[in-house]
Image: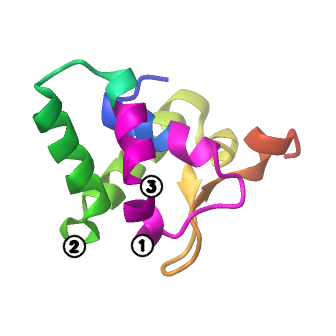
Amino acid sequence: IRLTPMELTLFMFFLKYPEGIYLSDLKNHKDELEELYMETTHNGSRQERIGRINKLINLSNNYTSIQMTRIKKAFEEALGPELAKHYYIQGGNGERKGIGRGIVDGAG
């Protein structure tokens, strides 16, 4: 599965939280997201990379939703919709977002 560094960062972040995370809480995990992002890319200066994480945690710009949609599309294209649903970030509006339980606990 090919993901951009930002998509991979978001995917790896949600893997760490099988119970899910409210998108509004992403700002409370800024340091963790920055660390993950710094591990996935060396493009741009450190300040530019931090700026991209700030964009991710600023929910007013829809950037996080765009990244989640791209992750979903990448998995659906590679695995088909039925298998992909276990791997992409999901959750209703105002609900915790998380990756399908099948990848985390082996169920599915």
Q: Is residue 57 left or right of residue 93?
A: left
Q: Between disc 1 and disc 2, whose residue precedes? A: 1
Q: Identify the residue at horizontal 63%, vertical 61% (top origin).
A: 20
Residue at the spot of label 1: 24
* Start-end of magenta stretch: 12-37
Q: Is residue 35 magenta?
A: yes
The quarter of the picture where residue 79 lies is top right
The total number of labels drawn is: 3
The quarter of the picture where residue 57 lies is bottom left
Q: Residue furthest top?
A: 42
Classed neighbour count for the residue bearing mark 3: other residues with Cα under 10 Å, few (<14), some (14–19), many (≥20): few
The quarter of the picture where residue 36 lies is top left
Residue at the spot of label 2: 60
The image shows residue 2 at horizontal and vertical percentages of 42, 23
Check disc 1 and report its element: helix, strand or loop: helix
**Visible residue check, residue 15:** yes
Q: Is residue 34 left or right of residue 89?
A: left
Residue at the spot of label 3: 29
Secondary structure, magenta segment, majority class: helix
